[in-house]
Image (cartoon, rainbow, N blue to C red):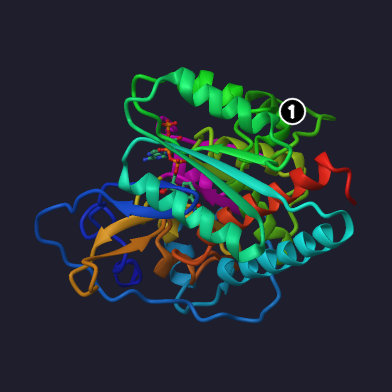
Amino acid sequence: MVSTIFSHCSSSTTARLLPMSRQHGVVYLRRLAVGPLHVGPPSRCSPSTRTLTLHSSTSPSPVLAASMATEASAKVIDGKSVAKQIRDETTAEVCRMKDAIGVIPGLAVILVGDRKDSATYVRNKKKACDSVGINSFEVRLPEDSTEQEVLKFISDFNDDPSVHGILVQLPLPSHMNEQNILNAVSLEKDVDGFHPLNIGRLAMRGREPLFVPCTPKGCIELLHRYGIGIKGKRAVVIGRSNIVGMPAALLLQREDATVSIVHSRTKNPEELTRQADIIISAVGQPNMVRGSWIKPGAVIIDVGINPVEDTQSPRGYRLVGDVCYEEACKIASAITPVPGGVGPMTIAMLLSNTLISAKRIHNFQ
Ligand code: NAP
């Protein structure tokens, strides 16, 4: 019965989204939603060792797809362990560079204001840098700082040879012009990859961006490291934000996928998504992508990090993705869990981008 298969993920009725802020895969709850909510115990697909097969793009009916799907069979794409692998590789390369030329990569983070969530992100980035031997530099400015003061620090970091990557923690206070500030970061040190020139190069054939934004880069890295082919595949990216959806679609296209983008005005999201061999979802809606949206054998990269109330959890909430995991893992051939999928990859990619930058600046192979 379709209704029993779909019992875990009725997003509109059982999963209540809690507001949060996030950047680089860390979540911080601002406040809890009120009202009764029943959330069943989370179920997990067990990892399987079967070979990944991407099926042709014929679309089964939702009922057929659901009736075929009775057991968890998807391979779990373990972002946590891939991220650890990348951190270990970064640690080794940082050591090699230090031994060979005496240079240690450095990442500078500028934080303006007193937001607790932003302070948490900055602390996590510092910890991550420490763990791989990258130097971190931090500037904390009060909420009422002027744009000129922030620009002065950016300019100093642009000129500082011990700094190879610069991040301005967003959001900035409302009296500041975010675009002016981000544009001031040197293109060579734009490890977030958000500079318009880097994004522009990503979009153009035959051009190479100096940096690729961390979260979408992490999504593609997962596909690569799991040996999942992209060339010639039909891909659907759900979401078109500047930081995830749009660059993810550009990256897939650069790898010769045929890409469609689904957004909030798309008329037939389910039908379009069901044609995809590869789905990347970055929406921020808990369990929006149901089993009936998924072609059997599709590969799913779920970027969404959505806190939903869970009275059984000591924290009072748990994190779920955009994709209904319990349904998807019975239909897809591979899927990222939430948490433990794309999230850990984002900071790993930031460290990797900082290393790439230092190597490029010092011409170290
Ligand atoms: P965003 O800026 O809010 O963008 C959301 C996108 O989803 C928009 O393009 C929006 O369409 C689209 N959308 C919203 N509702 C939709 C619907 N019902 N149907 C189809 N499309 C819909 O969010 P974001 O910053 O890209 O983040 C998306 C999710 O990824 C969030 O859950 C966030 O927490 C997570 N995230 C995770 C990481 C990580 O490290 N794992 C990093 C960043 C973000 P329109 O453009 O039409 O408005």
Q: Quadrant of ligand 1?
A: top left
Amino acid at the residue labelled 1: Arg
Any magenta on residue 13? no
Q: How many marks?
A: 1
Q: Is residue 260 left or right of residue 118?
A: right
Q: Compared with residue 106, is residue 300 higher up or lower down, i.e. above or below?
A: below
Corner quadrant of residue 254: top right
Q: Compared with residue 71, is residue 300 higher up or lower down, i.e. above or below?
A: above
Corner quadrant of residue 362: top right
State yes or no: Cβ of the residue under disc 1 lies below 8 Å from any atom of ligand 1. Answer: no
Corner quadrant of residue 134: bottom right
Any magenta on residue 269? yes
Q: Is residue 186 left or right of residue 274?
A: right
- Structural crowding at the residue carrying mark 1, measured as other residues with C-alpha within 10 Å and reported as few (<14), some (14–19) or many (≥20): some
Q: Is residue 30 left or right of residue 270?
A: left
At 43% from the left and 66% from the top, the residue drawn is 325
Secondary structure, mark 1, is helix
At 56% from the left and 60% from the top, the residue drawn is 128
**Range of magenta residues:** 259-283
Q: Compared with residue 117, is residue 87 higher up or lower down, i.e. above or below?
A: below
Q: Compared with residue 332, is residue 115 higher up or lower down, i.e. above or below?
A: above
At 56% from the left and 53% from the top, the residue drawn is 59
